[in-house]
């Protein structure tokens, strides 16, 4: 499969005639999120709807909350309709009437829902509306320290009833499949299709431009984390590791990309630790890969406290040939091979994070070799085109 030459761009989809579109089957994809940037999941959706179009299907994407205009433009194709479906939390009862209206309006042959958990009223609504194929796309991370175990009998019975119409569950990692199955709330078969990322040509210009924009010198070794600024992402542990490292050596710069409720707290901690000259919080960047975040970086960190399912930011970093320091929890060990594509550390252990940083900062050849190994791993097992194709093959058969 080809590597796209234009950063962040995918090939133009086929544009069916209006008469043809009326005859095409349709798929509704309900996602419990509101796209505010062009990140990993947004790129997957673009490739998915293009693959669905190539298979002769139209897409209806239903989001929970306001949608950024940049994303609307990014996925604005004749065969794609964007709908709002707010208040998707809980069992989905608060939006059941609105979803029923959307199902009756679009008359889809296939229905997919993702995020907020498998236990919803959605499968039965889709079945009653005549959908032949009904899937749950499981991206579920788990709380720190949670051990997946079989739920009580009453919860299992309710779960089996709610999920009875499901054709299958599609999990994004072996960890997600294993922990989901352990709950015992559904008898639906569980298929693993691991997340994919866009593989782009390496271009030195974004590295130079991004560093110049944020006042980072060419000689600095840049350590980056891209995330929603919440406790579960382990930003605090990385900041403490940064403070320890910067007392020992200079020339290391820490970049935190994203926004969230804990952002002000982390900025205050950075100042209290006395490392604000070596740390930048960029806030939301609408297209991290396209704007050069990973190109400008030398090391990527994902020190998550919770058990991540299959974080796309890690795959994006690996596709940019970055070594990855990550917590040894959840689905992260499926992506980061300790000692080969990066270094795994204990959850929340700033001392281990610092030791891993010291090792990589001091050894340019190790950074290069781990980055190359990670890049090959994404080429072999995490191409976004292949992920999208596998989804479409399942949903449309």
Image (cartoon, helix red, strand yellow):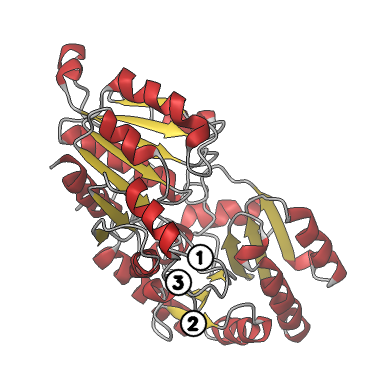
Q: Position of residue 268 (x, y in %)?
A: 83, 61
**Separation (CA) of disc 1 from disc 3:** 9 Å
Mark 1 vs 3: CB contact within 8 A:
yes
Q: Considering the image in quadrants, where does the C terminus appear?
A: top left
Q: Which residue position is annotated with label 3?
A: 148
Res. 42 mark: none
Q: Which residue position is annotated with label 1?
A: 142
Mark 2 or mark 1: name the one nearer the start of the chain: 1
Q: Nearer the viewer, residue 8 or 284?
A: 284
Q: Which of labels 2 and 1 is toward the front? A: 1
Q: Position of residue 153 (x, y in %)?
A: 41, 63
Q: Residue at x 48, y 38 (%)?
A: 92
Q: In the rendered view, tell whether residue 16 sits above or below residue 91.
A: above
| Furthest residue toward left | 397
Mark 1 or mark 3: name the one nearer the start of the chain: 1
Q: Secondary structure at mark 1?
A: loop
Q: Which residue position is annotated with label 2?
A: 343
Mark 2 vs 1: CB contact within 8 A:
no
Res 341 → quadrant: bottom left
Q: Which of labels 1 and 3 is toward the front? A: 3
Mark 3 vs 2: CB contact within 8 A:
no
Q: Which of labels 3 and 2 is toward the front? A: 3
Q: Nearer the viewer, residue 383 or 334?
A: 334
Mark 3 or mark 2: name the one nearer the start of the chain: 3
């Amino acid at each position: 499969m080809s590597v796209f030459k234009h950063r962040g761009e995918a090939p133009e989809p086929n544009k069916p005639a209006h008469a043809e579109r009326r005859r095409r089957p349709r798929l509704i994809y309900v996602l419990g999120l509101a796209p505010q940037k062009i990140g990993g999941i947004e790129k997957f959706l673009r490739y998915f709807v293009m693959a669905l179009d190539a298979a002769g299907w139209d897409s209806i994407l239903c989001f929970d909350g306001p949608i950024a205009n940049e994303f609307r433009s990014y996925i604005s194709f004749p065969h794609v309709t964007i709908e709002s479906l707010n208040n998707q939390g809980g069992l989905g009862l608060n939006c059941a009437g609105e979803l029923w209206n959307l199902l009756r309006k679009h008359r889809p042959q296939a229905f997919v829902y993702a995020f907020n958990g498998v236990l919803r009223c959605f499968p039965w609504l889709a079945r009653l509306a005549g959908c032949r194929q009904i899937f749950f796309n499981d991206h579920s991370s788990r709380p720190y320290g949670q051990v997946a175990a079989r739920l009580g009998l009453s919860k299992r019975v309710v779960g089996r009833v709610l999920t009875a119409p499901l054709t299958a569950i599609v999990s994004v990692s072996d960890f997600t499949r294993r922990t989901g199955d352990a709950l015992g709330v559904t008898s639906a078969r569980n298929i693993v299709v691991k997340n994919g990322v866009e593989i782009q040509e390496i271009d030195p210009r974004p590295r130079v431009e991004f560093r110049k924009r944020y006042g980072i010198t060419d000689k600095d070794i840049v350590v980056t984390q891209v995330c929603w600024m919440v406790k579960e992402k382990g930003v605090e542990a990385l900041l403490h590791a940064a403070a320890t490292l910067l007392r020992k050596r200079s020339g290391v710069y820490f970049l935190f990309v994203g926004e969230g409720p804990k952002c002000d707290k982390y900025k205050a901690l950075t100042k209290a630790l006395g490392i604000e000259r070596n740390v930048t919080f960029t806030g939301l960047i609408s297209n991290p890969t396209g704007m050069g975040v990973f190109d400008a970086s030398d090391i990527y960190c994902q020190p998550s406290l919770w058990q991540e399912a299959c974080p796309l930011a890690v795959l994006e970093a690996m596709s940019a040939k970055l070594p990855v320091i990550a917590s040894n929890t959840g689905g992260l060990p499926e992506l980061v091979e300790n000692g080969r594509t990066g270094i795994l550390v204990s959850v929340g252990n700033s001392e281990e994070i610092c030791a891993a940083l010291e090792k990589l900062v001091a050894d340019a050849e190790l950074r290069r070799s781990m980055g190359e190994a990670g890049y090959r791993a994404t080429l072999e097992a995490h191409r976004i085109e292949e992920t999208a194709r596998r989804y479409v093959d399942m949903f449309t058969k």
